Amino acid sequence: MNTVNMGHPVEILIVEDNPGDVRLMQEAMRDSKVLNKIHVVEDGVAAMAYLHRDGEYADVPCPDLIMLDLNLPMKDGREVLVEIKEDTELRRIPVVILTTSGAEDDILRTYNHHANCYITKPIDLQQFINVVRAIENFWLTIVKLPPDGNKRG
């Protein structure tokens, strides 16, 4: 997944309805060692429109990584995860659950639906930034994923 030598940014889709959390994630990834481009949608319906490139999202790139909150308006993040992992075009995209819920039922259900990891958002500001940087480091510099057949261009 490391794109340092590939010449194009890592496309990250953040699905999060809390503007403060979005700002923190963007801030944490701004000085990344890996070139990245962050895209943000605020609800589950917009997430699926983005991923299917519907309407206003017709020309967006396919994300290399999805950071998904569970508690979203319009369509719950749990539903979004199921739809992603049931779609043969999307299922290879890693989905990182980053949510306030620490409920064992949520953890079990998301792993049963093939989430790639589950992280409970820390309440402490610096810890939250550290967690986002750790996610970025792991998924953008360490992990190797299969080639993406969903890229345009």
Image: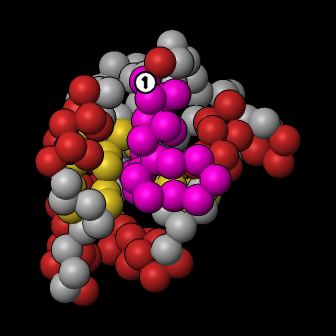
Q: Is residue 27 above or below residue 138?
A: below
- Please, what is the three-letter code of the amino acid marked with disc 1? Lys
Q: Is residue 35 above or below residue 79?
A: below
Q: Report x, y in % for residue 149.
A: 52, 17
Q: Is residue 74 visible?
A: yes
Residue occupying the point 26% across, 35% down: 109
Q: Report x, y in % for residue 21.
A: 41, 75
To which residue does mark 1 refer? 85
Q: Report x, y in % for residue 97.
A: 31, 49
Residue 85 horizontal side relative to residue 37, left or right:
left
Q: Is residue 7 above or below residue 22?
A: above
Q: Is residue 9 visible?
A: no
Say few, some or many: other residues with alpha carbon within 10 Å of mark 1 (under 14 / 14 to 19 / 20 or more). some
Q: Is residue 84 on the magenta stretch? A: yes
Comparing 78 with 143, the one in front is 78
Q: Is residue 67 on the magenta stretch? A: yes
Q: Which residues are magenta?
A: 66-85
Comparing 117 with 142, the one in front is 117
Q: Report x, y in % for residue 28.
A: 33, 74
Residue 64 horizontal side relative to residue 126, left or right:
right
Residue occupying the point 34% across, 19% down: 146
Is disc 1 placed on a helix, strand or loop? helix
Q: How is the image coloured?
A: secondary structure
